[in-house]
Image (tube, rainbow, N blue to C red):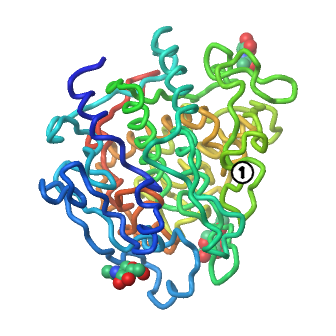
């Protein structure tokens, strides 16, 4: 529906993620300032009371002395790139405070808004058609507001460059960027990253989905657009892997020519080296097609069950020491999928991780998995389980633990989002950020 508020939102422009194009000019990078002018001509819309330019406040739990030796550009986000960014007031948000916080719209950002995310099989024929055409548009439209970072050698900052990407590819890139090994004292540590294997996992992915959902709302003018989910509980095979829905695979595992995403290419594919940041960005010839082999991995026979999901939600501790893939009796580790949900002490492939492996192909190459729209539907359901847990246990930011995972401290900004979302603040019901879930199969 193209209402008046839609027009406003379009007019104000998009703004939520890395890297804002206007902040990647040589001047912005040299001054380390990302406080763009809003339409009133003042930085961060300060003249209109929308926000102000503020200098960076250290939030990392990593000892200050150590930070100096760390070369990783993502640690202590966004300090490596910018030491001044916009702080927006009230319900204003975005890198220049020109946008509304998630869950609000209108010129003054004072209207509460809520969309409903539904199971893909609950969508009507027309709604599905619309969903697939929106994705096609997002995949082929250059992002006006964001660019991605590319380099062939992460050790050398002067080789970093910013390149154009489509709206969908910006999203796929964000996930890829978060997963690159940490560069510490000249060495790569691939046992940890910013979005996985730690307490940031559920909230980090929540922001990623909200970002793409908002981008698609702005791109299409459809304020009501909501990402559908795939409720895979108890599935014997991937029943949505049909050409009407997410697509069948051919013998080689590529998506069937008659499916919606048959000719999608994976950004950053083929260059999954620790020392490169998406060297192939923009080079169609270097990118591979999406592929999937649902059920082909012999180690994974079926999807998680209804009981697995119920057992996962029962764990009352959000996360437990040592806050990684070895955490026991941890809701986060059961959901993420390194823990058996029923007993909470057996370390085994489960839940979220298991579904990635079951689907196979692009989805099982986790750094580039967000290239496959299956990622969206899968993570949208993971987010529904997260929401069920938040409500069941009445969780608040106090449930978010201090921990040693770099970038995953309670007060650190989820990386690489703009503006800053503190990890602990993401432990809050989705109703505060403008969406809820439909009921499906009793959940
Ligand atoms: C931010 O970085 C710039 C460029 O390195 C430097 O000149 C400036 O003093 C820094 N400002 C703050 C508040 O740290
Ligand atoms: C899933 O299994 C059903 C029933 O066994 C079968 O009819 C269907 O073709 C299978 N679907 C896929 C995508 O393999
Ligand atoms: C988790 O952290 C502990 C303590 O640092 C370590 O011994 C263990 O190997 C880690 N587990 C994984 C899977 O990285």
Q: Quadrant of ligand 2?
A: top right
Residue 236 appears in the figure: yes
Quarter of the picture containing the C terminus is top left
**Residue located at (33% from left, 48% from top):** 393
Q: How many numbered marks appear?
A: 1
In the foreground, 68 or 432: 68
Residue 385 appears in the figure: no
Quarter of the picture containing the N terminus is top left
Q: Position of residue 177 (x, y in %)?
A: 59, 57
User: In the image, is the residue at mark 1 within 8 Å of ligand 3 by its beta carbon?
Assistant: no
Q: Is residue 84 above or below residue 317?
A: below
**Residue located at (56% from left, 25% from top):** 136
Q: Position of residue 264 (x, y in %)?
A: 68, 31
Left of 410 or right of it: where is 279? right
Q: What secondary structure is found at the residue carrying circle 1?
A: loop
Q: Is residue 203 above or below residue 225?
A: below
Q: Position of residue 360 (x, y in %)?
A: 74, 38
Residue 165: quadrant of the picture: top right
**Residue projecting furthest to the top:** 125
**Residue projecting furthest to the right:** 251
Q: Position of residue 100 (x, y in %)?
A: 25, 44
Q: Is residue 196 above or below residue 137?
A: below
In the foreground, 236 or 256: 256
Residue 277: quadrant of the picture: bottom right
**Residue located at (46% from left, 55% from top):** 18
Residue at the spot of label 1: 280
**Residue projecting furthest to the bottom:** 65
Left of 339 or right of it: where is 393? left
Neighbourhood count class around disc 1 (C-alpha, 10 Å): few under 14, some 14–19, many 20 upward: many
């Amino acid at each position: 529906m193209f209402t008046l508020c839609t027009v406003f939102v379009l007019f104000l422009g998009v703004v939520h993620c890395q890297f804002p194009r206007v902040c990647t000019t040589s001047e912005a990078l040299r001054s380390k300032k990302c406080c763009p002018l809003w339409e009133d001509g003042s930085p961060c819309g300060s003249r209109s009371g929308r926000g102000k330019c503020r200098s960076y406040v250290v939030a990392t739990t990593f000892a200050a002395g150590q930070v100096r030796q760390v070369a990783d550009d993502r640690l202590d986000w966004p300090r490596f790139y910018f030491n001044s960014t916009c702080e927006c007031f009230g319900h204003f948000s975005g890198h220049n405070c020109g946008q509304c916080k998630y869950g609000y719209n209108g010129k003054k950002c004072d209207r509460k808004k809520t969309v409903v995310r539904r199971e893909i099989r609950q969508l009507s024929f027309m709604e599905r058609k619309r969903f697939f055409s929106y994705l096609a548009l997002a995949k082929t439209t250059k992002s006006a507001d964001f660019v991605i970072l590319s380099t062939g050698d992460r050790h050398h900052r002067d080789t970093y460059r910013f390149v154009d990407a489509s709206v969908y590819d910006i999203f796929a890139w964000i996930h890829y960027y978060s997963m690159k090994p940490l560069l510490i004292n000249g060495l790569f540590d691939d046992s940890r990253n910013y979005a996985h294997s730690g307490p940031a996992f559920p909230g980090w992915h929540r922001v990623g989905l909200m970002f793409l959902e908002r981008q698609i709302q702005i791109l299409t003018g459809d304020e009501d657009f909501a990402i559908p989910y795939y409720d895979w509980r108890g599935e014997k095979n991937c029943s949505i892997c049909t050409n009407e829905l997410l697509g069948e695979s051919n013998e080689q595992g590529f998506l069937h020519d008659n499916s919606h995403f048959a000719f999608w290419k994976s950004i950053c594919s083929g260059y999954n080296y620790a020392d490169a940041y998406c060297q192939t960005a923009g080079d169609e010839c270097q990118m591979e097609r999406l592929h999937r082999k649902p059920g082909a991995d012999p180690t994974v026979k079926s999807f998680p069950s209804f009981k697995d999901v119920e057992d996962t939600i029962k764990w009352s501790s959000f996360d437990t020491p040592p806050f990684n893939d070895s955490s026991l009796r941890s809701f986060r580790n059961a959901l993420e999928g390194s823990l058996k949900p029923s007993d909470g002490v057996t370390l085994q492939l489960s839940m979220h991780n298991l579904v990635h492996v079951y689907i196979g192909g692009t989805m099982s190459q986790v750094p580039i998995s967000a290239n496959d729209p299956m990622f969206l539907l899968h993570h949208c359901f993971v987010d529904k389980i997260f929401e069920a847990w938040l409500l069941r246990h009445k969780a608040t930011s106090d449930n978010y633990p201090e921990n040693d995972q770099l970038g995953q401290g309670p007060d650190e900004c989820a990386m690489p989002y703009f503006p800053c979302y503190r990890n602990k603040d993401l432990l809050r019901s989705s109703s505060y950020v403008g969406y809820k879930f439909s009921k499906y199969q009793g959940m």
